[in-house]
Amino acid sequence: MAIETTSIKRETLEKLFSNWLSEGKRILAPKKLGDHVDFALVGSLAEVSLDQVQTVQSPKIAVFPRVEELLAFQSTDGNVQLRERDLAVLPETVIFGLRPCDAAAFASLKAIFDWDTPDKLFSARLEKITVVGLSCSRADEYCFCTSVGGGPGAAAGSDILLTDMGREDFLLEIISEKGRQAVRSVSAGLQPDAAMDKESRLARVTPAFTVEKISSVLAALFDDASFWEKQSLRCLGCGACAYVCPTCACFDIQDEGGASGKRLRCWDSCGFGLFTLHTSGHNPRPLQSQRWRQRLMHKFSYMPERQSVLGCVGCGRCSRACPVDMNMVEHMRAVAEAKP
Ligand code: SF4
Ligand code: SF4
């Protein structure tokens, strides 16, 4: 559908929050938690933190929780009974105030979870979320959305996109039918947007590299062991970059319990040595340099080639979180300048 542009006063937005809650939706939004801001359930707009460049964790927890039950099992006298998840009870969720890069990340996750055999649990969660993005008025040195097809005011992935225009006014863009339904209860309070200049409120993010160049150079660099060793020398394999990433989707499956118990899906990372360790003891990626190569190749070469979507939205979280300052933009520039 064509994007509908309007505006909304903060007090009407407050009312919309109450309406969503009384309709039984839960609202996940950036919230100040001690010394950092992260996604948490909120009960009012007043609880939402709007000013940070980014949250520490991404909102992928709404569709891909850190740990989730896939099924329960019970074994009695050799007979095993399975109980699948009841997808109908998954909560309707509004993710409010996420940045445009995070909204765009749902397409990357969907490409992974829908590839080959579609993942029913992921799809059911995705169907039940409404994405209310918030344009960025500030960026930092780690942001590179404009290098990977996004931007501080980009609409892709959001059902509704808000831009803070100051003086308690927000520009409100309705992007999808889901978004239109989400604001229906306050439609009388939406105003024409005539005098609002969205561009003037957006952060400036200068493109740092061209992704087409990266994808083609990466394929030719695959066998250049010395390049990958040099690039990954500092990497500790701690997995922080993967855990904060809105598009990383590696997981492990564990059974918990004995004769009765649960099958759990848990976050994992291709940066961990154990991730590819076979029962035989063979590990196809025994070196950290190979695991770092896998991380970059998957995001910038394999996914565009196989699924026509990048595995990175330029949020910069991996660089902010890395304890040894592995900076994604610097790595991309090194790839772009390499001579395979
Ligand atoms: S956060 Fe840094 S050190 Fe840890 S695995 Fe990622 S790149 Fe390596
Ligand atoms: S790889 Fe880094 S910059 Fe790209 S989406 Fe993941 S956390 Fe964000």
Image (cartoon, grey):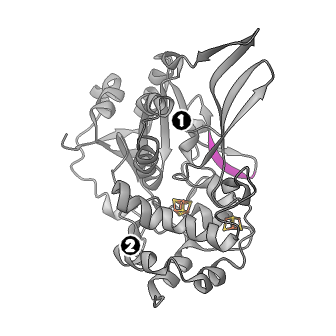
Residue position for label 1: 45
Q: Main secondary structure of the magenta part?
A: strand
Q: CA distance from mark 1 to mark 2?
A: 37 Å
Left or right: residue 200 versus residue 334 is left
Front-lying residue, 171 or 249: 249
User: 300 above or below 230?
Assistant: above
Residue 262 in the image, given as x and y percentages of width and height? 70, 24
> Residue at the bottom extreme?
339
Q: Which mark is residue 185?
A: none
Numbered range of the magenta stretch = 35-39
On the question of residue 145 being in view, the answer is: yes
Q: Mark 1: give few (<14), some (14-19) or many (20+) Cα within 10 Å.
A: many
Amino acid found under the numbered disc labelled 1:
Leu
Pointer 2: what residue? 211
Q: Foreground: 221 or 135?
A: 221
In the rendered image, residue 218, in percent from the top left (x then y), is placed at 45, 76
Q: Amino acid at mark 2?
A: Val
